[in-house]
Image: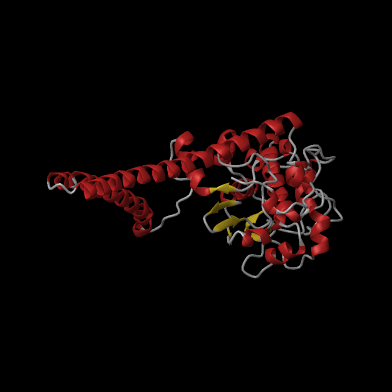
Amino acid sequence: MADKKPPFSLASQLHTLTLDDGTPLAGSKHLPSQPRIKLADIDALKNFLQQDLCTPVLDRLAPHLYMISTPSGSNISPLHYQRVKSRQIILTEDPRLHLVWYHDRIFVKPLPTYLLSYSFWERYLCNDNAATAAAASPFQATERQRLANAARGLLRTYFYLIRHESDFRIAQHEELQLVPKDVTWERFCDFSTAFNEIWDQDVAERYHYGELRLSRLNYLVKLFLIGRDYQEVNWQYSEYFARYYGPLLFVFGVLSVLLSAMQVGLAVEQLQSHHWTAMYRVYRWFSVAILCALGAVLAWLIGLALLRPFDELAYTVKMKSWKRSKGNTALPSLQSGQASGNQMRTV
């Protein structure tokens, strides 16, 4: 995709900004939907756009994200399928949480109104070679490129989040409003029709991946950035300690069964001295059978715990190799946007 061109046409834009003679966006004194951000204050505008679009931590982690997610920007289930997975869609304005999921919820960032305007893209994110100085972008080339890549990545995710009219209705629900309510399904399709043609080299590195599992993301931050959790999920001490109750009870139960079986094995030695040979054999072999069964169950659980992550890792490495051999393209089954979420193996 060309760097100097917005990812949608002027005719298909969903939000119109008034242009004046030699003063772009003069019809709007502030950033659309952000009355506190004045367009004349370039520093404040730049800082807001960086906070609203960029994901620096995930961009730094991008070389390692293949360890926790399928290396494809199309690895995104549509909104209706998020409900099939029993996930609650949580609205967030934080770009670092966009498409991050945790157990039964997934965070989704609404489409910023200013990204729906062709004029905004031309003025601030694309145009550094304008005919007049007034029409040129006020941002430096590197800043503009970073913001444009993050914005294109965010837009591309909506091609996969909203693939059906049912997804569109969910997106416009009163509690979410991911897409403005005055937009129709037909207009949105016109607006987003070319988003799947945005390639990885045109988006921020975070958007080389789709959905990210928060529990694994927290471990990845601790491993590679030597930091705390990427996002805190337990806001109360009771919730923090409650996650240890299950494993502790499991260990306690295993040790109890183990010690009981060993105690039975020692106790049956007294039966042999009383000439209860038959009972001695039954109890002795029963205790041995319990120990063997316990060992088999533990081996099975450990095998499952090791096999699934390695299986998922092997799959992501395979997809990464395929992607490298084919270039920066989405997986073929999802590139058309017609595949269902369950047709993509996710990790």
Res. 46 in view: yes
| Quarter of the rendering occupied by the C terminus | top right
Quarter where residue 67 is shown: top right
> Residue at (63%, 61%) from the top-left corner?
84
Residue at the outermost right position? 11
Give the x, y percent position of residue 140: 68, 36
> Residue at (59%, 42%) from the top-left corner?
69
> Residue at (72%, 54%) from the top-left corner?
340
Give the x, y percent position of residue 202: 73, 38
> Residue at (65%, 58%) from the top-left corner?
110
Residue at the outermost top position? 325
- Give the left or right position of residue 21, taking residue 253 as reference: right
Q: How many marks?
A: 0
Give the x, y percent position of residue 80: 68, 61
Colour theme: secondary structure
Quarter where residue 117 is shown: bottom right
Q: Nearer the viewer, residue 19 or 117?
A: 117
Q: Is residue 33 above or below residue 129?
A: below
Give the x, y percent position of residue 208: 66, 40
Q: Nearer the viewer, residue 60 or 33?
A: 60
Res. 98 in view: no
Residue at the outermost bottom position? 174
Q: Is residue 141 above or below residue 272?
A: above
Q: Nearer the viewer, residue 268 or 99?
A: 268
Q: Nearer the viewer, residue 95 or 35?
A: 95
| Quarter of the rendering occupied by the N terminus | top right
Q: Is residue 180 above or below residue 157?
A: below
